[in-house]
Image (cartoon, grey):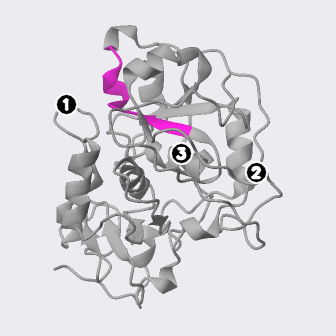
């Protein structure tokens, strides 16, 4: 396996590496809160591009761990889809088990951030270790798999999305049975770096550019199938992350991404807070920012599912 910080850095035809990953500050407090968790190693900068091509994956297939993160907003489980056909050797990572903290209600959002200890235990049990390079995919342009990739990258892991996702791999070559389990691995819990997250109470007064990754209909107050109120956080700008995906199923070139972000008032160095419905697809916007060379940005984990459940919070539909 290729160690972190090695020369196995993929090129994707875009601009140079943004070199973001954030040094993790240790802290104390409750589970799943940024800046909290176990001892952990100090985070290092992720040297990988945030997206890798299928050709790159074929060349380095034996040097990476593949992770399948299929998940469906309509409630269908993702594992049956994985078992029906996945890229050979991929492990299945369950969004609501490995990347989210168990909860009884959605007052903190539908997918509150997993504690560092839970994250580490779940990945280690899947055979993903500290030194492993992870390439993740799903069947919806990477908007689900992005959460795993982003969390790994901000804590020093070498991780990227497979450009084109499941559709980039020939269907005839998919594995139709669950592969043998990988041996458990050592994955050290690291604190979530505070500087990579935004808290709900700062959103009403921030001067950062807030971007909402959801589709235009939900942003502008159309029917919302999963959250109690429709609309968006006042002051937010709509940058639907699925629109970064071109007609061929691949992520847009850096120049095109820069044009899209510029239309939302984002240039190099602009402070950005990204949110979505539940802090998942917002990570895809953050990876797209990296690909465009525009900086790291911050994640509001609770996103609209937290904001809309608090009757004290105002909403906008303009």
- Horizontally, residue 91 falls left or right of residue 141, namely right
Which residue lies under the disc numbered 3?
148
Q: Quadrant of residue 3?
A: top right
- Viewer-closest of 88 and 60: 60
The disc, 2 or 3, on the residue closer to the chain's N-terminal end is 3
Residue at coordinates 69% horizontally, 68% vertically from top-left?
35
In the rendered image, residue 16, in percent from the top left (x then y), is placed at 41, 43
In the rendered image, residue 179, in percent from the top left (x then y), is placed at 59, 15
Residue 228, placed above or below residue 55: below
Which residue lies under the disc numbered 1?
248
Residue 120, placed above or below residue 103: above
Q: In which quadrant will I find the N terminus?
A: top right
In the rendered image, residue 132, in percent from the top left (x then y), is placed at 66, 31
- Horizontally, residue 83 falls left or right of residue 163, namely right
Which segment is the magenta one? Answer: 159-170
The disc, 2 or 1, on the residue closer to the chain's N-terminal end is 2
- Viewer-closest of 166 and 191: 191
Q: Quadrant of residue 317?
A: bottom left
């Amino acid at each position: 396996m290729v160690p972190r910080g090695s020369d196995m850095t993929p090129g994707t035809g875009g601009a140079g590496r943004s070199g973001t990953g954030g040094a993790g500050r240790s802290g104390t407090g409750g589970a799943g809160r940024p800046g909290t968790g176990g001892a952990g190693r100090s985070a290092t900068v992720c040297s990988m591009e945030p997206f890798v091509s299928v050709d790159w994956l074929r060349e380095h297939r034996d040097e990476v761990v593949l992770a399948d993160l299929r998940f469906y907003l309509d409630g269908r489980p993702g594992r049956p889809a994985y078992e029906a056909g996945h890229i050979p050797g991929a492990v299945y990572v369950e969004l609501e088990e490995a990347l989210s903290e168990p909860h009884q209600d959605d007052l903190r959002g539908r997918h509150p951030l997993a504690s560092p200890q839970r994250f580490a235990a779940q990945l280690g049990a899947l055979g993903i270790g500290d030194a492993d390079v992870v390439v993740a995919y799903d069947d919806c342009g990477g908007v689900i798999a992005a959460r795993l990739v982003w969390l790994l990258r901000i804590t020093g892991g070498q991780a990227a999305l497979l450009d084109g996702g499941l559709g980039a791999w020939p269907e005839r070559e998919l594995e139709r049975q669950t592969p043998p389990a990988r041996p458990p691995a050592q994955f050290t819990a690291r604190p979530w770096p505070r500087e990579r997250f935004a808290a709900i109470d700062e959103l009403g007064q921030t001067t950062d550019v807030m971007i909402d990754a959801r589709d235009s209909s939900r942003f502008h107050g159309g029917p919302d199938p999963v959250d109690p109120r429709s609309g968006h956080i006042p002051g937010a700008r709509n940058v639907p992350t699925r629109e970064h995906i071109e007609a061929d199923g691949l992520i847009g070139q850096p120049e095109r991404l820069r044009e899209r972000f510029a239309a939302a008032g984002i240039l190099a160095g602009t402070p950005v807070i990204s949110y979505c419905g539940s802090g998942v697809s917002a990570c895809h916007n953050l990876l797209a920012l990296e690909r465009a060379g525009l900086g790291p940005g911050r994640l509001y984990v609770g996103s609209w599912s937290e904001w809309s459940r608090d009757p004290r919070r105002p909403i906008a539909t303009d």
